[in-house]
Image (tube, grey):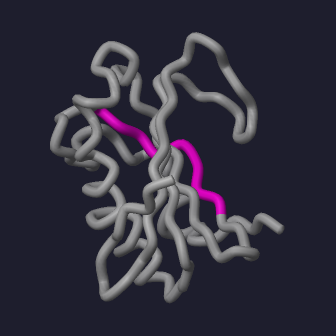
Amino acid sequence: MIRPFLSALLFAAAPAVAAQDLAVPSGQPLQLMELRLEEAPALARFRFLAPELGARGFAAVADDFRALCDGYARPALAAEGRAVDRVVISLSEQEVPFGETAPGVAQFFEVFRLSDGSCIWEYF
């Protein structure tokens, strides 16, 4: 089951979260598109719009995933008292509905386990 949460903190603020508010190592502009919580397993999905993603490629933005998990997702979850086992950070150069494919649209995601106050990358 998917349940939205953190409404006051994230959903209401999503349109206002601008590139300058989400500083990442690549310097790319980002905007929070959506936040989803899945209960089994306990998982939080933070989906970001990254309009320059296709032009930059994965190697140029690889460090952004951990920065977003540690610097944005983990603190947001903690502020709301939400405990999850995993955090998924996804970047998309265009808005694509969750679960749909979009050939020609660059989309990347990484999964992190939360442990000892930090995000640990989960290799598939």
Between residues 64 and 9, which one lies in front from this camera angle? 64
Query: x, y (%) of residue 108?
Result: 47, 35
Query: x, y (%) of residue 78?
Result: 42, 83
Provide the major secondary structure of the magenta segment: strand
Between residues 95 and 123, which one lies in front from this camera angle? 123
Residue segment shown in magenta: 29-36
Query: x, y (%) of residue 9?
Result: 48, 68
Residue 124 located left or right of residue 118: right
Residue plotted at (34% across, 20% down): 52
Residue plotted at (57% across, 57% down): 45
Residue plotted at (75% across, 68% down): 3
Give the position of the N terminus as an image quadrant: bottom right
Query: x, y (%) of residue 25?
Result: 16, 43
Residue 109 located left or right of residue 119: right
Compared with 38, 108 (above or below) is above
Between residues 59 and 24, which one lies in front from this camera angle? 59
Compared with 106, 40 (above or below) is below
